[in-house]
Amino acid sequence: MNTGKYIAVVVLLYSGFGYSQDFKTLVRQMRNDYEQCKTLQLVMELTVYDSAESAPYYKQTIDIKRSGNNYWYQFEENELLLNDKYLVMVDNNARQISLSNRNPKTEAELYKSLQFNLDSIFSRYETFQYLGKEDGAEHYLVIEKNGPIEEVHFFIQAEIHELKKMAYRYRQGHFVIISFNRFDKNVPFKADTFSESRYVTKVNEKIVPSSFYKQYRIQYQ
């Protein structure tokens, strides 16, 4: 299976059964918190199973940082940086840095291929059921009528408006858990967190890899 398609973060917007007003209010508060925070760091652990009863066969940690319209991602051996000027993609296995100017069309295609654009964190589902509390979090279940996913479970710590965990059950039997190990708002980042100088620098008007990445090659796009 293509594990990349599991890297998605979504929160319910629609309701159907009991507790609908409470849930709608909670999701609205979560969305407002996300939209209004100036900075954000999100660390997710993605675990994939053949079924809910089997042992996991794939696990990955994803680190996402955001400050305004600037983003930094780390997943597997890859890093991605978006700042006011550039899109920088780093493949540490291949020792390659891809550099291009920011382009809305390119970024839209990139987000679609990676499927974990942080700005798509709030998506819509048709109906939900409230299943009570589990480990201090409110447990909601979404049943999807169409598509590859049959069920989505959400675990939300209501008092702090924080998503703790999601679980997907696919119609073909596969099961995916996304645990949010860190969901920190208004984080004080270092000055160079979103700077392209971490990866590249300019020498005699030519862009070259920075000192830490001097063994990498640069691909201009």
Image (cartoon, rainbow, N blue to C red):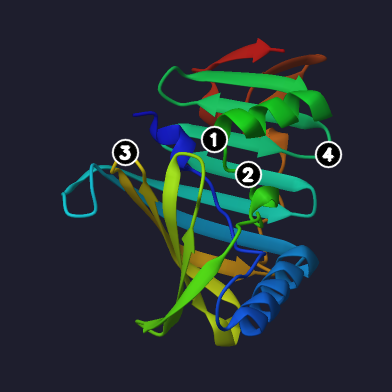
Say few, some or many: other residues with alpha carbon within 10 Å of mark 3 (under 14 / 14 to 19 / 20 or more). Answer: few
Query: Residue 201: x and y, percent?
Result: 71, 26
Q: Nearer the viewer, mark 3 or mark 2?
A: 3
Q: Which mark is residue 51?
A: none
Disc 4, SS? loop
Residue at image location 62% in from the left, 14% down from the top: 218
The three-letter amino acid code for the residue at tag 1 is: Glu
Left or right? Give the position of 218 relative to 132.
Answer: right
Read off the residue under disc 1: 79
Say whether disc 3 or disc 4 marks the residue closer to the N-terminus.
4
Read off the residue under disc 4: 84
Residues at badges 3 and 4 in contact (C-beta under 8 Å)?
Answer: no
Say whether disc 4 or disc 1 marks the residue closer to the N-terminus.
1
Image quadrant in which you'd find residue 22: bottom right
Residues at badges 1 and 2 in contact (C-beta under 8 Å)?
Answer: yes
Read off the residue under disc 3: 172
Q: What separation in Å lies between label 3 and label 2 (alpha carbons)? A: 33 Å
The three-letter amino acid code for the residue at tag 4 is: Asp
